[in-house]
Image (cartoon, rainbow, N blue to C red):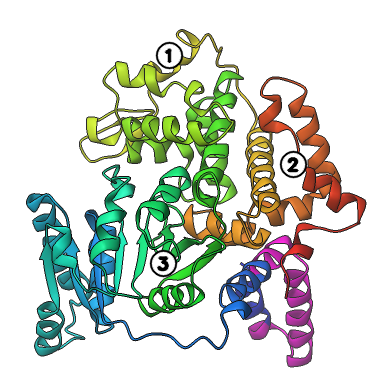
Amino acid sequence: ARIVDCVEAALLLPEDEGRTYERAVFEELRASDASAALRHLARAERRLGLNPDLAGIELLARRTIAIAGEGALAADLARDMLGRGMRVTLFDHDTEVLTRTIGLVAAGYEREDPGGRKTAEMRRQEWSRLDGATEPRDLDGLDMIFDLSELAGRGARTRMADFGRFAAEGAILATAATGPDLDTAITVSQRPRAVLGLRPAGPASDRLFELAASPITDREILAATIALMRGAGRRVVRTGLGDGSLSERLLGALRFAADRLLEDGATPYDIDAAMQAHGWQIGPYAALDRQGLIADLEWRARLETEDEHPLGTAGIGLELLEMGRGGISTGAGYYRYDADGNAWPDPEVLSVLTGTRGAPVRGVTSGVILARLLAALANEGARLVEEGVARRPSDIDLVMVIGHGLARWRGGPMQVADRTGLLAMRNALRKLAQGRDERFWRPAAIWDELIKTGRRFEDLNGP
């Protein structure tokens, strides 16, 4: 809107007055919260490329990669790796799954190149470098093995033992596993210095990945993985090992706080509307319907074993599943879906809230909803920084913006905490902790540390 104002001023005002007006508008916008948020994220993205501990490392030549897993992510990664000249082997024990994934690779070529930017010969050469395999021994001598199967709930704790046995010397062994499953993969591989965690940083985009490494991970392996992912058009957020990835932990906190709001009288539709009005691509309950309620409950049960938050006890997902409401795939979940896939609020869900859970639908303001959810995210982010899982607060903001669809001009939960004021945010958390779920809302110790020294989360980000 302000651009239009400047264009009109250029047409209507004398040149000197027009320039003065444009300068005033520029200064006004530069001082806005949105400008601060955008500049914060630009700096955060620049920091992703700053890895002084990996400077000067000579990388081994790697030309072959296996991708174990299924679906669009495996297919897209395979196509991008083929595009940078690598030989790619898609792996799955199930031949039907393998065939479907290869089909997705082919469909992706048609979708991405409608104008013929690649010649037929270029596409033929790329396609000739694609293989399929169903047995670990078929991966003998490969330079990198990337196991995505954990994302589909099909991962095997001991699969990395097979991969470690057959991969080439110096190979990168990457897995989408997190927490104890990643620890197991590192142990059984017999190559603990070669194994790292690598997974998308959220469902909104596969262009940002989390890379989890242990203190003993080989530095060349780390540097080479970052370079390979960059070559495939992906950026990497480096993390430490912990109970779950950044994305999982933040999403768990968000869902827990949202489910508690349901019990306080909000509806799924109130919460989704408040978040979308704040700039999220999709609210948590519409996102749950896309994911599928069965997958969500399985995810909660697994994460609960790794974390102290009682994720499995909150919400009404189990009740909805027992009613046959599994999400979009079944035509109903938190929403009801018409034949065209459009989502509609459903009185039946409100009946579950008022009846089964005993929570009267009395309305919760969007301001309360947003304050509660952002406080939950900021506190979980503070814990992640405190535990050393997150290397810097700005990485958490990138995960939420790129991985989970928060609008860039909002900046992310850690930047919001700085803007709100750490003292005010900590006091709000203390007040929430006086009720139920004291462990969840209890402010992480880092809040007090920063407040005492007059610092903000931004001060922990580095240059």
Question: Does 287 lie within the magenta span?
Answer: no
**Residue at the far front in the pictured view:** 190
Find residue 258 and report its horizontal and vertical position in percent.
56, 31
Type of secondary structure dominating the magenta stretch: helix
Identify the residue position indicated by label 3 in the image: 194
Asked if residue 389 is positioned above or below residue 394 in the image, the reply reads above
Q: Is residue 134 left or right of residue 399?
A: left
Instruction: Give the quadrant of residue 47.
Output: bottom right
Decide which of tag 1 and tag 2 comes sooner along the chain. 1
Q: Nearer the viewer, mark 3 or mark 2?
A: 3
**Can residue 434 be seen at all in this image of the molecule?**
yes
Q: Earlier in the sequence, mark 1 or mark 3?
A: 3
Question: Which residue is denoted by mark 1 in the rendering?
Answer: 352
Residue 137 occupies which quadrant of the picture?
bottom left
Q: Which region of the structure is painted magenta? A: 10-38
Q: Which residue is mark 2?
A: 444
What x and y, as percent, mark residue 59? 43, 85
Is 411 rendered above or below residue 359?
A: below
Residue 66 or residue 297, whichever sits in front: 66
Please indicate whether residue 184 sits to the left or right of residue 7 in the image.
left
Tell me the quadrant of the picture where the C terminus can be found: bottom right
Residue 52 vs residue 158: left or right? Answer: right
Distance Cα–Cα, label 1 vs label 3: 49 Å
Looking at the picture, which amino acid does disc 1 mark?
Answer: Val
Separation of residues labelled 1 and 2 (CA atoms): 34 Å
The residue mark sitting in front, 1 or 3, is 3
Q: Which residue shows up at 41% across the image and 67% down it? A: 194
Specify the amino acid type for callout 2.
Ala
Asked which secondary structure carries label 2, the reply is: loop
